[in-house]
Image: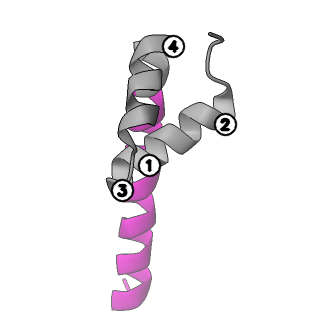
Amino acid sequence: MSKPTFTQIIRSVLAAAFGVQSNKNRQQDFEQGSLLAYIIGGLIFTVLFVLLLSTLVSKITGN
């Protein structure tokens, strides 16, 4: 069992964020992955998602 790569962590965070994470992948994350890596990935995704949404709303409303 090897540690997940950066790309695997990103894919797992995105899948979890959109609710399409498979049970098999979720179990692998818990068994092989570092909790800190997933927390940091989740926080980065959340910040980028909120910035993207606020930028879109600002452009649409013309502010």
Label 4 SS: helix
Q: Which residue is denoted by mark 2 in the rendering?
A: 7
- Asked if 58 appears above or below 24 in the picture, the reply is below
Q: Earlier in the sequence, mark 2 or mark 3?
A: 2
| Quarter of the figure with the C terminus | bottom left
Q: Nearer the viewer, mark 2 or mark 4?
A: 4
Cα gap from disc 1 to disc 4, whole angstroms: 17 Å
Specify the segment rendered in magenta: 39-63
Give coordinates of residue 6: x percent, y percent: 66, 29
Q: Are marks 2 and 3 in contact (CB under 8 Å)?
A: no
Amino acid carrying label 1: it is: Ala
Q: Which mark is residue 15?
A: 1
Residue at (44%, 49%) from the top-left corner? Answer: 15
Q: Nearer the viewer, residue 40 or 9?
A: 9
Evaluate if marks 1 and 3 touch, with contact meaning CB atoms under 8 Å apart.
yes
Confirm whether the magenta stretch covers residue 27: no
Q: Which residue is mark 4?
A: 32
Q: Amino acid at mark 4?
A: Gln
The numbered mark, 4 or 3, whose residue comes first in the sequence reads 3
Left or right, residue 1 beside residue 29:
right
SS category of the residue bearing label 2 = helix
Instruction: Classify residue 8 by image quadrant.
Output: top right
- Circle nearer the N terminus (1, 2): 2
Residue at which label 3 appears: 18
Q: Amino acid at mark 3?
A: Phe
Counting from the top left corner in percent of width and height, residue 40 is at 45, 26
